[in-house]
Image (tube, rainbow, N blue to C red):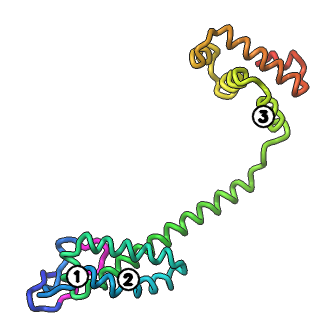
């Protein structure tokens, strides 16, 4: 498309990313941003409200479109119809939000469906978590780090800043307390 020639009526491209290569019609007295904002914010909001069905979303989208217009007002104000550019940006933003919301909703639906298919924790796991909660903090940390995080006794000792023998003591006492609470025989508790 050839650049606009002064005195001709060419309409600017209505895309949201109008750049310096976008042809503009030359106006001797372009409207001010404040005039356009005051005259068209309400109308554009009503149009987007009809699309969204949510007044707050419509206001947000129109406000964002006006912010984008303001940042390039020297160019936008010289278009044959600056409001058309703002309207196009607002509609593009609305469609993008609508698509993102749809994508998020589909993701949440899939997550809920997947979670519904999972069984909750079994009674053994619930009993183990409850029993772990009754242990002193040092024993509980040692048990979790050893049997759930698969850390060695030396790694636990280093992490906790204690001797390896202390960690062994915590683990021994923790296993004994869990065995008593869960009704496990002493030979089974020593296997850890």
162 is higher (above) or lower (below) than 44: above
| Residue occupied by mark 1 | 32
Mark nearer the viewer, 3 or 1: 1
**Magenta stretch, main secondary structure class:** loop
Q: Earlier in the sequence, mark 2 or mark 1?
A: 1
Q: Position of residue 95 (x, y in %)?
A: 45, 75
169 inside magenta stretch: no
| Residue occupied by mark 2 | 41
Residue that appears at 46% across and 82% down? 48
Residue 155 placement: quadrant? top right
> The N terminus lies in which quarter of the figure?
bottom left
Q: Residues within 10 Å of mark 1 (few under 14, many from 20)?
A: few
- Is disc 2 placed on a helix, strand or loop? helix
Please give the range of residues in magenta. 10-18
Question: How many angstroms separate mark 2 from mark 3 (CA)?
Answer: 57 Å
Horizontal placement of 62 versus 72: left or right? right
168 is higher (above) or lower (below) than 132: above
Q: Position of residue 10 (x, y in %)?
A: 18, 88
Residue that appears at 23% across and 72% down? 72
Mark identifier at residue 129 = 3
């Amino acid at each position: 498309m050839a650049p606009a020639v002064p005195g001709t009526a060419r309409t600017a491209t209505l895309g949201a990313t109008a750049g310096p290569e976008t042809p503009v019609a030359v106006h001797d007295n372009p409207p001010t941003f404040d005039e356009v904002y005051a005259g068209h914010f309400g109308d554009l909001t009503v149009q987007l409200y009809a699309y969204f069905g949510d007044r707050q979303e419509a206001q947000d989208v129109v406000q964002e479109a006006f912010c984008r217009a303001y940042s390039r007002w020297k160019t936008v104000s010289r278009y044959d119809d600056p409001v058309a550019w703002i309207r196009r940006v607002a509609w593009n933003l609305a469609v993008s939000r609508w698509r993102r919301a749809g994508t998020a909703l589909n993701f949440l639906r899939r997550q809920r469906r997947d979670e519904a298919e999972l069984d909750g924790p079994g009674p053994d796991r619930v009993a183990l978590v409850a029993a772990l909660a009754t242990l002193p903090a040092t024993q509980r940390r040692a048990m979790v780090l050893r049997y759930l995080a698969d850390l060695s006794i030396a790694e636990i000792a280093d992490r906790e800043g204690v001797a390896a023998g202390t960690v062994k003591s915590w683990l021994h006492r923790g296993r004994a307390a869990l065995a008593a609470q869960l009704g496990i025989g002493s030979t089974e508790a020593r296997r850890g």
